[in-house]
Image (cartoon, rainbow, N blue to C red):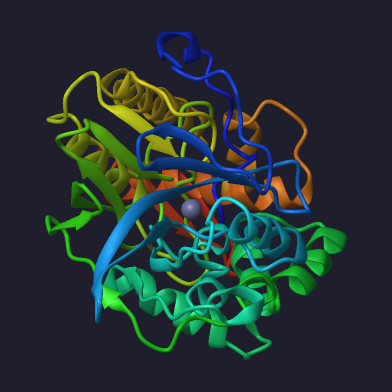
Amino acid sequence: MHVKQGAPLNPLEHQLAYPWSEIPAAGTAFTLRPGLHWLRMSPPFALDHINLWLLDDEIDGPHGKIRGFTAIDCGITSEATMAAWERLFDTFFAGKPLLRVIATHFHPDHVGLAHWLTRGGKQHRWRAPLWMSAAEYGYARFMSADADDSRGDSQVKHFRRHGLTDAESLAKLRTRGTGYYRSLVPAVPAAYRRISDGEQFDIGARRFRAIVGHGHSVEHVSLYCESDRLLVSGDMVLPRISTNVAVYDLEPDADPLPRYLRSLDRYLPLPADTLVLPSHGKPFTGLHTRVMQQHQHHAARLAEVLAACSTPRSAADIVPVLFKRELDLHQLTFALGESLAHLHALWHEGRLQRLRGADESIRFVVADAARA
Ligand SMILES: [Zn+2]
């Protein structure tokens, strides 16, 4: 569910600037600007990381101001991530509480530990509210509570329909799909505080505006601070990899790519020198460049997919068109979802026709001239 491996590295990365070369070690905080701290958590199952942000914050208490922190995103529920947070509580926090947890979206690396952080870790040190958009909170709640073991079956059906027919891969997918989200997000706080698009609120001395985006997840929240020219971009804008935009079994007719591209354009009015704090990779400047790179990247991929569909193609047929390297099963599911997102963009536009086989298989072909 998180962004990943399927997407190619960015060959135009040199057009972006990275103000910091160092990277915070797990369990430490690296202060980027006064009151703004960068954390990095590594899930144990992948050679990957997620960036989290900690901001100095304060609220009114019964005897004056209570000073503490707001966390943006949480990490997955794992012993390693909890241990890293506990080290921070014992050192960097210096007795101060977490006052609020904000999750940009429902993917496990972002909201997984919210249930634990809002209660103050192992020792239940505090109670902090969870802030999210309504749709992201709803998704997190139902995905985490979903005890229906048919979820793996429904994913298998989806991928089989789109051309993944290898029995061993399908068997692995069935096992992985069942309870996968719950294993990383075993619980979600029972109540939340809604973040709406365009809403402004203060975190410590900084005022932020919520910018909702679509295509990567349902109602992803990025946060922009005008006085600091700072964008917490979540997974919507990443420096090294392209954001995962995919079609999954839950919404099999979805058309996420145009939604994603339209959402990206909402960052163009922000200043060119905005410092972008992404969930993966390093803080960077070059927001407009990165947005334009994404447009060009997807336009080129769409042209390749359209050309490949001169004869009927399944999403699985399109994977090697878009992804030139070997993919493991985990990467293959992202790659299939991405391929389908590109096919669907062309299908919804009327440039491809969708063909259904008698065996429920689905393929796409260039719409014939008479129909067009
Ligand atoms: Zn994500």
Determine whether, in the image, residue 242 is placed left or right of residue 169.
left
Report the residue at 43% width, 31% height from top.
Answer: 32
- How many numbered circles are shown? 0
- Residue 313 in sight from this viewpoint: no
Q: In this view, which residue lies farthest toward the right?
A: 168
Name the foreground residue: 131 vs 338.
Answer: 131
Q: In this view, which residue lies farthest toward the front?
A: 63
Determine whether, in the image, residue 199 is placed left or right of residue 245.
left
- 87, above or below 141, in the image: above
Q: Quadrant of residue 132?
A: bottom left
Q: Position of residue 51 (x, y in %)?
A: 53, 44
Report the residue at 76% width, 66% height from top.
Answer: 79
Name the foreground residue: 86 vs 184.
Answer: 86
Q: Position of residue 352 (x, y in %)?
A: 36, 44
Determine whether, in the image, residue 264 is placed left or right of residue 140.
left
Q: In the rendered image, which quarter contains the N terminus? A: bottom right
Report the residue at 18% width, 65% height from top.
Answer: 196
Q: Position of residue 282 (x, y in %)?
A: 51, 29
- Residue 129 in sight from this viewpoint: yes
Q: Position of residue 7 (x, y in %)?
A: 57, 35
Q: Quadrant of residue 217?
A: bottom left
Report the residue at 60% width, 23% height from top.
Answer: 22
Name the foreground residue: 146 vs 335.
Answer: 146
Q: In the rendered image, which quarter contains the C terminus? A: top left
- 13, above or below 70, in the image: above
